[in-house]
């Protein structure tokens, strides 16, 4: 029995995305994906139980990569409103990208046959919302600390520091 590796799994997902993007879910076959990745269908089924499972893993990866790129901007600028605007702009650009539109087309086409689209959207939106709330919480804590430091400094300036003895 061959050892399954994450690198191989990721290569399968990357190859599958190219085929799904080109053909859509319904017209894509596991044979086409195995040809694209350079392996057998048995290898694909060793990593993924079905085409649906591979499709879901593929979409989750692509959506995750788009979200990560947007979240990376939250650490770039010390000015929170600017960071938030950059995040929103990049997130919306990602949502309107050709990859995101290909995902939406595939999910719409698959919508009559399964609830995969709703599940994927729910997980994706929940993940983005949770990450954004974490960032807002960290920013709030940082701002609270800055405010406490400013109050302490103002008190020291107004009251004067005790003279060293």
Image: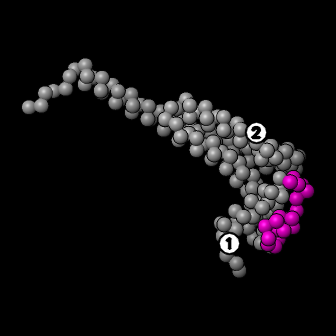
User: Pointer 1: what residue?
Assistant: 4
What residue is shown at x 73% (from left), y 44% (from top)?
121
Chain-order first, disc 1 or disc 2: 1
Quadrant assignment for the C terminus: top left
Mark 1 to mark 2 CA distance (whole Å): 34 Å
Q: Is residue 55 above or below residue 109?
A: below
Q: Is residue 138 above or below residue 30?
A: above
Q: Where is residue 12 shown, x and y percent of the image?
A: 75, 64
Q: Residue furthest front?
A: 77
Q: Nearer the viewer, residue 103 or 45?
A: 103
Q: Is residue 81 above or below residue 74?
A: above
What residue is shown at x 68% (from left), y 46% (from top)?
66
Colouring convention used in this rendered image of the protein: one colour
Magenta stretch holds residue 43: no
Callout 1–callout 2 Cβ contact below 8 Å: no
Q: Secondary structure at mark 1?
A: loop
User: Residue 128's image quarter?
Assistant: top right
Quadrant assignment for the N terminus: bottom right
Q: Where is residue 91 shown, x and y percent of the image?
A: 67, 39
The secondary structure that most of the magenta stretch takes on is helix
User: Pointer 2: what residue?
Assistant: 96
Mark 1 surroundings within 10 Å by alpha-carbon count, few (fewer than 14), some (14 through 19), many (20 or more): few
Q: Is residue 26 above or below residue 11?
A: above
What residue is shown at x 47% (from left), y 33% (from top)?
140
What residue is shown at x 20% (from left), y 22% (from top)?
160
User: Residue 157's image quarter?
Assistant: top left
Residue 106 is left or right of residue 96, and the answer is right
Magenta residues (range): 22-41
């Amino acid at each position: 029995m061959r050892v399954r590796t994450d690198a191989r799994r990721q290569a399968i997902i990357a190859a599958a995305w190219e085929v799904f993007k080109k053909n859509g879910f319904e017209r894509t076959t596991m044979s086409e994906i195995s040809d694209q990745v350079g392996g057998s269908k048995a290898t694909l089924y060793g990593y993924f139980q079905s085409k649906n499972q591979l499709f879901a893993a593929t979409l989750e990866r692509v959506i995750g990569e788009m979200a990560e790129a947007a979240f990376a901007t939250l650490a770039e600028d010390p000015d929170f409103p600017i960071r938030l605007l950059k995040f929103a702009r990049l997130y919306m650009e990602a949502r309107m990208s050709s990859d995101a539109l290909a995902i939406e087309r595939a999910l719409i086409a698959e919508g009559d046959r399964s609830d995969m689209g709703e599940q994927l959207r729910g997980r994706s939106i929940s993940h983005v919302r949770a990450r954004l709330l974490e960032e807002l919480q960290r920013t709030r804590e940082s701002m609270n600390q800055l405010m406490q430091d400013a109050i302490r400094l103002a008190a020291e300036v107004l009251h004067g520091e005790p003279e060293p003895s």
